[in-house]
Image (cartoon, helix red, strand yellow):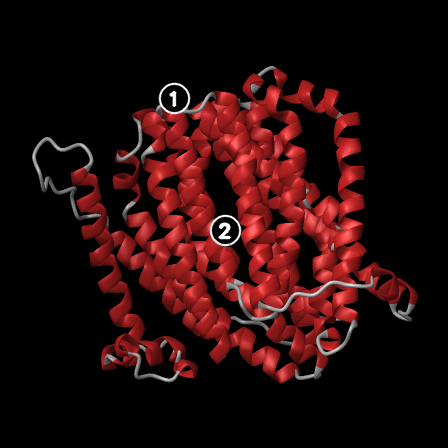
Amino acid sequence: MGIIKRQSLKTSMVNYAGVLLGMAFFNFVFPHLLSEEYLGLIGLLQYMMYVLSPLPALGLAHVMYKYYSTWKETDTLPQFNAFSILVMAVASLLFAGLFFIFHEPILHFYKARSALFIPYYFLIIPLVVIQVYNQYFEMYCTMKLRVAFPAFLREIVSRLLLIILIFLFIYQFLSEKQFIYGLVLVYLLSLLILLFYTIRGLDFKAFSPLKYWQNNPKLKEQLGFGGGMLLVSGLFSLHNFLDGILIPAFLGLGAFGIYARPLVLGQMIHVPFRAISQISLPIIREAWVQGDLKKIRDLNKSTGLIIFLIGSFLFTLLVVSADALFLLLPEKYSIAKPVLYIIALGRLADMAFGLNTEILYASKYYRYIVYLSLVVVLMTIGLNFMLIPPYGMNGAAMAVSISLIIFNILKTSLIYYKFNFHCFSRHYITLLIISGLIIFLVSFIPDILFVKHHKFLNPCLNIFFRSGVAAVLFLIPVYVLQISKDFNDFVKLALSGKIFKGGHKMNEL
């Protein structure tokens, strides 16, 4: 757990710094300075990039993940790197051709309610290609157990550049066209920095791509796995970002611009899970290679509990602060308050199921992820088309959360059937009771007028006050009841002062 704790802690800190940075500007500053249509356009371009990038990626990053343990000390890894870079380039050209061929029906889908998107349709192509290579190099960093720097680039550097770009547009230093094209340059710059880091800092090598193809008796097995992961990653992306693709078509870019604000807030509780998941991947894979099922079971149990503890804590803080958070937004954004609760509840449920995706990915039953993903994505599409017309953006949020919960039930049931273990314990019920009681109690605290006639300072102070009270009420019983040994050990280390003075061993984290 030492390397997981260290890298997860670093990455979580970076992720949260990025989320807070993005939230401060994109959720609470830009809605007052930029129209919801422009916010929706930025979101739509990003969502399309995420949804479409798995196609030319071909699952090759996942092939590296699966076989890295057996390749890392051989020439096969640099040969595969070269092969992947070349094949993804060819696939990107094919993708660009198909994207051009089908541009008319796609543009027709958005023309009525999202006309602002139409002139920038073809910018999706460079955005997708950049994301394809970015994912591959990020996976390489993950296999080297170095996820903090890629997270820093993704969460801090890219966001800062986007924020600067938007301010330049707001104050008319850039035209609309220059601003939108600048989005592509921001992602390209981040990719170039990541490429430099992997080559210079992590000894990334790529040579002799044909040797991987020619001298590989397991080529069919490996590319078959990549094909399966292509489908899985494509289905995952579609599931996670489908709401952002459909809302602009059904309700308009403005509605998506409003919907995305509480969506980001609700997903905040999921940030530590992403960090833990990333750094757990190679550890779980190594355990499968060694046939150490006990290590996987113990890791899933301990990590699952700490993930749900963190999720419950953040969910509690978010819910008790929800009213004050929406006071920081223009009044028309309050229509999306239910989205916050629905998304946050769905993400908390996702965290409750632990590392089920990571475990199945690394196991010999990875193909089941494909089948389950297909079922869930079809259900997600159906739910979106059923729920968005009558319930609007709330319907989109319900579709996301319902399908997410069902997906996790299916994955965890499969793991229990095949391996006879899960991550749940009686402490889950204790955490739910603690969260529920705190939300109930804090709801009786009225909004306090800290400063007369101040529109923004009072909500901010109420957020700090209410979340501070909730944090104390949550953390004390969690520590006293000894719900998580990892949590208690970390608190003891922090109280000892070693963590701040640098006198601790890193494996104590």
Query: Image point 80% across, 45% down: which residue?
Result: 90
Secondary element at image label 2: helix
Q: To which quarter of the image does residue 415 belong?
A: bottom right
Of residue 488 and residue 427, the one placed in the foreground of this image is 488
Question: What is the x, y in percent for residue 500?
Answer: 27, 75
Query: Image point 26% across, 78% down: which residue?
Result: 501
Of residue 273 and residue 71, the one placed in the foreground of this image is 71
Query: Image point 52% across, 35% down: which residue?
Result: 183
Residue 379 visible at all:
no
Q: Is residue 23 left or right of residue 177?
A: left
- Using the numbered discs, state the Cα–Cα distance from disc 2 to disc 1 in whole angstroms: 26 Å
Residue 231 visible at all:
yes
Quadrant where the C terminus sits is bottom left
Q: Amino acid at mark 1?
A: Gln
Question: What is the x, y in percent for residue 17?
Answer: 37, 54
Q: Classify mark 1: residues with Cα within 10 Å, few (<14), some (14-19) or many (20+).
A: few
Placement of 238 over or under 430, stated as above or below = above
Placement of 322 over or under 105, stated as above or below = below
Question: What is the x, y in percent for residue 505?
Answer: 38, 84
Query: Image point 29% across, 40% down: which residue?
Result: 325
Placement of 407 over or under 343, stated as above or below = below
Q: Is residue 93 left or right of residue 429?
A: right
- Residue designated by label 1: 172
Which label's residue is closer to the chain start, 2 or 1?
2
- Residue designated by label 2: 154
Q: Is residue 401 left or right of residue 110?
A: left
Q: To which quarter of the image does residue 220 belong?
A: bottom right
Q: To which quarter of the image does residue 218 belong?
A: bottom right
Question: What is the x, y in percent for residue 140?
Answer: 63, 63
